[in-house]
Amino acid sequence: MLIQRAVLLDGTPADIRVGARIVDVADRLVPRPGEDVYDAAGGTVLPGLHDHHLHIRAAAAAMTSVHVGPEVVRNLDDLRRLLTGAPVGADGWIRAVGYHDAGAGELDRGVLDAAGPPVPVRVQHRSGVLWAVNSAGLQRLGLPGHPDGRLRSADISWSAALPRTEPDLAQFSNRLSGYGVTGLTDATPDLGAADAAVMAEARRRGDLRQGVHLLAPGKRILHDDGLDLDELTRWVGDRHAENVPVALHCVTAAQLIVALAALRSAGRHPADRIEHAATVPDDAVAELAAAGVTVVTQPNFVAERGDQYLVDVPAAQHHELWRVATLTRAGVPVALSTDAPFGDADPWAAMRAAVHRRTPGGAVLGPRERISAQAALTMFLGTAQAPLSPRRVCPDAPADLCVLSEPPATVLGELDAGLVAATVLAGELVLDRG
């Protein structure tokens, strides 16, 4: 295929010939006999975006789950209305996602028994670390005597009892193609060979078009009530001994401090990562930089949850939330991601959040953490193995491309997924909005 009349991000006009990889890039290329031609009409062509941290199957499942976030659940009556009207899935469960305690308070089996229908119901907290399950659900899981029905996501002792139904990966993959996303890093913990096989089969069938990299077995979620520096140091050392980099999930200051101490004691792998770094105290910035560890963060949560942060987080700590500019100024390698389904899967919305830092109500949260549009876009252009090395549109590079309908100045000014006109994966046009 030949892409004509394109403009690269640096403003260079270019025609681009692609096969499985980029064959040629020049000011003008003549179509070959029988060659498909795509007219970019002066629009921008980028390397396809890479989402550096999301959860593929959970995001696909969320597309058919009932959403019970604080924007729709403001009290117990709202929760009761949504659960009562929710369809029961083919697995016999009502699955709800995105809940926050600001809606109807802390959920447990008793609250769900009163609020929902008498069928198995499970509701995921928007943090992703906890599920609340009603009595019918606990009975189905073989846990009828569980005291409160609050179950941690990472505890496979209960989740293994759930029916193994695969979500519609094709629907989610098509959504990502609409954003110009061509690569994914799945940060779900405890993924094994069987999960990798499922992903590989989905890609073989064409249901999952994007390239996929799994962080497991080096992903570890830290919890404040279970922080054990000695044990974590041993675990990090064991992974490094196997030449496996670690990815430590840190959303609180305590988790970050313990993670950095473990990395300092165990030594580092060049591909070690801190996931989220939702809260970075001022006195941890220099240590993060010294650790040489990559931070993969999600400033989209400022745009999605910022008003709640203004209520829940002391004002003196607002500047510590979802930092980007401070980290990059200190020399910390930073890449961006969406954390879908816990964040919106649109990477362009995440870029805008990094640039503007506006909450849903219009307040600016952490103005000193704002970065340029070009920097935000670049943080989605790395690869799974090298998130800080932005790819280029050049010969012999993978032919995974995002074609936008406008020139670079407009793209950077708007950072809007609506500008994505086409997505190319391995030289094949998988999205064409005409």
Image: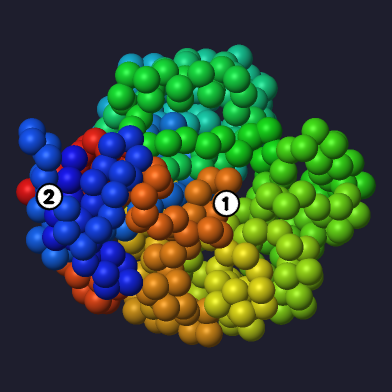
Residue 72 figure quarter: bottom left
Q: Say which residue appears at 61% left-offset and 80% top-offset.
A: 329
* Residue 202 location (% of width, % of height): 38, 22
Q: Residue 399 or 67: which is nearer the viewer? A: 399
Numbered circle sitting on residue 67: none
Q: Which amino acid does label 2 sit on?
A: Val
- Does dot 1 land on a helix, a strand or a loop? loop
Q: Can you tell which quarter of the image residue 116 is in?
A: top left
Residue 220 in sight here: no
Crowding at label 1, few (<14), some or many (≥20) Cα neighbours within 10 Å?
few
Q: How many labels does the image show?
A: 2
SS state under label 2: loop
Q: Nearer the viewer, mark 2 or mark 1?
A: 2
Judge left or right: residue 56 versus residue 423: right
Toward which corner of the image does residue 63 lie, by quadrant? Answer: top left
C-alpha separation, residue under disc 2 versus residue under disc 1: 34 Å
Q: Indicate the amino acid at tag 1.
A: Ala
- Residue 299 shows in this picture: yes
Residue at 43% from the left image edge and 82% from the top image edge: 364
Disc 2 and disc 1 in contact, CB within 8 angstroms = no
What residue sits right under mark 2 in the picture?
Answer: 30
Q: Nearer the viewer, residue 207 or 113?
A: 207
Q: Is residue 31 above or below residue 258?
A: above
Quarter holding the N terminus?
Answer: top left
Residue 416 as seen in the image, left or right of residue 318: left
Ranked by sequence position, the earlier of labels 2 and 1 is: 2
Residue identified by numbered label 1? 386
User: Quick check: 32 above or below 207?
Assistant: below
Query: Position of 277 compared to 229: left or right?
Result: left
Residue 149 spot, x, y in % from top left: 59, 32
